[in-house]
Image (cartoon, rainbow, N blue to C red):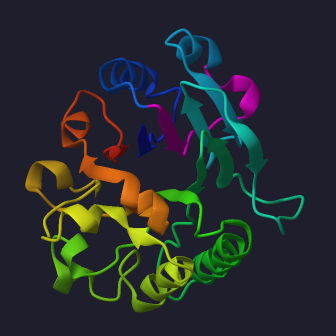
Amino acid sequence: MRIATWNVNSVRARLPRVLAWLAKQRPDVACLQEVKCVDDEFPYEEIESLGYHVETFGQKTYNGVAFLSRDTPSDVVRGLPDDGDDAEARAIAATFGDVRVLNLYVVNGKDVGTPHYAKKLAWLDRVATYVRDAFPMSDKVVVTGDMNCTFDDRDVHDPLRWHEKILCSTPERQALAKIMEPGLRDAFRAFHEEGGHYTWWDFRTRGFQRGQGLRIDHVLLSPPALEACTDVEVDVEERAAPKPSDHAPVIASFR
């Protein structure tokens, strides 16, 4: 099984790229974030024509998450358990075979110390509670998505420049660590301990062309899932394609 995560930065604007990538990589499960459309406007027909089943949790203009899978999932849950009526579309969970997957689009936070930043930390704390209560670490569990947070300075092209800035601040990293406390591991680091691997590059600064990126898209695995994992790779080639998302897909392979 191959499970991928990818912030597509608008599934409709990026549809030619998504279709070409699906045809090339053929993941068993693709976890998309920032689809930027309501469910009724999702391009089901085009994606289903490639043999994929689609489960969406969309939102007008912003946010939105989706699963594209070669087999029909079970036990699909949209949102967090304590979401209110005005909750943003940022989480979707489903079971694929014997693997439970939670697909997240974490709040960005904008700038440290702002109300958006406080909202981010509070939302991450709710995710930590959800993972602790609903995802047994004795099962194969995958928590993945655009986490909008680096683990440490190996994930940052210029640690001094980004020190205690958004995506790299200590409280954000502590909040991410809390999600992992029940037993999740950063699967990418299980195979690649060195720095210099990134998943997001800023369009505005031509970050990709300059090699200035951050690793903020993660695959977190329970012990049984990590035992079955054979590799995790960043599909940097997709980020170099014409009219790309600002994120590269991350693909985890399992035996």
Magenta stretch: includes residue 39: yes
Write down the quadrant of residue 205 in the picture. Answer: bottom left
Going 59% across and 75% down the picture, which residue do you hit? 120
Going 71% across and 71% down the picture, which residue do you hit? 130
The image shows residue 91, relative to residue 158, as above or below, that is: above
Going 28% across and 50% down the picture, which residue do you hit? 230
Looking at the rendered image, the quarter that the C terminus falls into is top left
Identity of the residue furthest to the right in this view:
85
Q: Magenta span covers which residues?
A: 28-43
Q: From the top left corner, tell me how far across and down residue 2 is, in percent.
A: 40, 38
The image shows residue 85, relative to residue 54, as above or below, that is: below
Q: Is residue 112 shown to the viewer in this render?
A: no
* In the displayed structure image, the side of residue 245 where residue 235 appears, left or right: left
Q: Is residue 18 shown to the viewer in this render?
A: yes
Write down the quadrant of residue 151 in the picture. Answer: bottom left
Going 39% across and 53% down the picture, which residue do you hit? 228
Q: From the top left corner, tell me how far across and down residue 66 is, in percent.
A: 61, 39
Magenta stretch: includes residue 193: no
| Closer to the camera in the image, 163 or 251 | 251
